[in-house]
Amino acid sequence: MTKVEDKTAVPGRRQFLQTSGIAAGAALSTMAAPLTARAGSCDAVPQSWDQTTDVLIVGTGFAGLTAAIEARLAGAEVLVIDKMPVHGGNSIINGGDFCAAGTPMQKEAGITDSPELMYQDMLKAGAYLNHPELARTVAFESAKTLEWAQQFAGVQFSRVGYHGGHSVKRAHQTINASGSELVNKFMKKAKELGVKVETRTKLTRVITAPDGRVVGLEVRKGYRFPDESTGTKTFIKARRAVVLAAGGFSRNVQLRQLYEPRLTDRFESTNHPGATGEAIIEACKVNAMNVQMDWIQLGPWTSPDEKGFGNVPLFCERLVGYAPMINPKTGKRFFKETGNRKERADAIIALGDPVLIFGDHATVTRQVFPAVLEKALESGAIRKFNSLDEIAAAYSIPLAPFKEEVARFNGFVEKKKDTDFDCIIFPEATPTVTGPFYVARLWPKVHHTMGGLAIDKNAQVTSLDLKPIPGLFAAGEVTGAVHGAVRLGGVAVADCCVFGRIAGRSAAAEKAWS
Amino acid sequence: MFPPCLNRFLASICWALIFGAVLSINAAPVRDPAAAGNDCVACHKGDDPKAQSPLPAKHKSTKTMKLADCFDCHEKRTDDTLITKLTGSHLHQLAGVSCVDCHGSSGKPAPVEMEQCLSCHKSGEKVAALTAKLKPQNPHFSAHYNSDLDCNLCHHQHQKSENYCSECHRWDFKVP
């Protein structure tokens, strides 16, 4: 392939060390001994670069695109690469819920919320493993970032809903119930601003100078996932910084089993096929610290009757707190429907086989997005029945205990208190009585990797020596310790957008090394 | 540039050189871009069963047929659909769009970008409008990607096409 001439003169080694000395000096002096042993040899920096940019971003999801926009607004030249043939990663197939605390939409809906409450919810769910600064940043910036998405990028939200583990309703749903509303609007804005985007370009190595400063990436252009023999080796110089926004590793069965052995290939995943985590590994090779890699989330709201994420999660999460979840073997409830993802997933897996969630006509028509219901009915992932007897017959549920349990649950709904499992019962919940009834099976799938690269509140990656790595930033699922043990639903979007913007601004503010 | 006949001549020399060796090694059908689209035996020839004509013995002569004529039997009168049996390159060739029309005639034929498809097929939205009535889902429109996906994600020209959506969805599209 033709090599693009690098416009600036390629610095000799001595000149490079002199010019970057001031910037790297402080870091260099404190890191001197470990660095020389560990950093790549001088030969690892290419003699000439094929492409140059100021800020080089890996990943075209929520975090990558918000970083691109902010870096561009700060005056940097920006290039975003993605290894897949399509943009958007997991973000574009996401369910479209953005959790934010203290928004005008919440006030309009009569919901009282605060960033402090969201922060406490995140900590509680996270078992206090969240790095407080990171979790606080997400909670306290969530409302402003949602407003920015609306005002600056034209993203439209239609309602505020609930997600398990939160204290109040704060999940702002996009008008099409998909993350694509955010991704496509961000992409449009990014391109309008002059951000360049190249798909089929895979990160293969993070390139550092001898002092550990990240200077660019080695990539493969024209890469055809998943064929590792494809693509042409290309060197892209990043004058100011690299931002890793490459997502998690839910689809990497080998890697995930290293951290949690029970996650064999028996467990399917909701993620896009590219969620394999190479960026985390490559960053670690240049001295990055990783944290909390053992904490891998299973979604408790997926159906074994659909591939990937499917439509059932958007059915299930609209019913929790309104309708019952039943173990078909006993006909009884077994756990609070409004629990967080981990406790619900663990409870279902403990039973060994899929469970059921179902709602009646009144609840389902009030709660569930019509297109979601329609599509799932067509595919058979949601089934329609005229009576509880029919449901029991279809799933071999013992009839009398089942009917008793539904009546018991309805009693809780009337009193607005669940004395069996302490599930939240929402004020407008109505008893499950009027057919037709809509039923879905549930079985957990691997969904999100809470662990990843350690970052500080400026989204700069932390090294094994506990110092920020010059020129390296990260945001979104590729990072760790924002969510701790358990990520709450809708907070990933908030994390990606809040820290994506911070990473973009921080990256653009790095002093150019060349 | 050159007049079309000279283009075809140059292209066929080029291709013959490239694929001549291939022909001698594995006796696969010859890629002769100068062959008429409906002249199956021009490429599918020889005693080797691998190279032989794909047409069954009793088949009508196709020498004067256009793609519409093939479909006249295959889509309208029998269930023996040609979709998924003929690669995209064949469908194009039969419809009068030759190798050279997409790949040009200079240098080694390289993979073609989506702009080339759009030079005839106009836009993702226009294609989506043509398939709007398909059930259970319009393959050219999605909540994720609208109508912006690269044609080649599904529609491969020189190998069997695939259904990109089937990574996550169970839609049984027959992809030409």
Image (spheres, grey):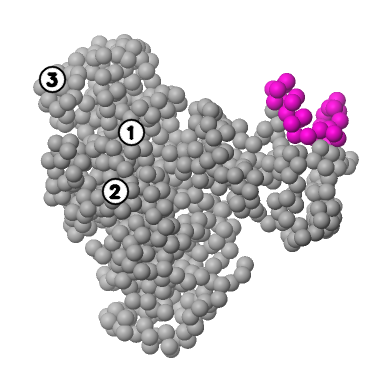
Q: Bin the neighbour count of mark 3 within 10 Å (Cα to Cα): few under 14, some 14-19, many 20 and up.
A: some
**Residue kind at label 3, given as amino acid type:** Glu
Is residue B53 in view from this perspective?
Answer: yes
Along the line of sight, the residue nearer the viewer: A28 or B163? B163
- Chain assignment, label 1: A
Q: Give left or right: position of A129 versus A248.
A: left
Label 3 sits on residue? A414
Residue shown at 51% from the left, 45% from the top: B148
Circle 2 residues within 10 Å: few <14, some 14–19, many ≥20: some
In the image shown, does A7 or A443 lie closer to the viewer? A7
Q: Which mark is residue A386?
A: none
The answer to whether marks 2 and 1 sit on the same chain is: yes
Q: Quarter-wise, where is residue A385 in the image?
A: top left
Q: Are tags 1 and 3 found on a single chain?
A: yes
Give coordinates of residue B146: x percent, y percent.
47, 42
Q: Amino acid at mark 1?
A: Leu
| Amino acid type assigned to the residue bearing label 2 in the image | Gln
Front residue of A261 and B136: B136
Q: Earlier in the sequence, mark 1 or mark 3?
A: 1
The residue sitting at the right extreme is B47
Tell which circle, 2 or 3, labels the residue nearer the N-terminal end.
Answer: 2
Q: Position of residue A273 (x, y in %)?
A: 47, 46
For label 1, the crowd category at 10 Å Cα-Cα, with few meaning under 14, some 14 to 19 and many 20 or more, is many
Please report the bounds of the magenta region as a residue range. Answer: B53-80
On the rendered image, what quadrant is the C terminus of chain B found in?
Answer: top right
Q: Does residue A244 show up?
A: no
Which residue lies under the disc numbered 1?
A: A314
Protein chain holding label 2: A
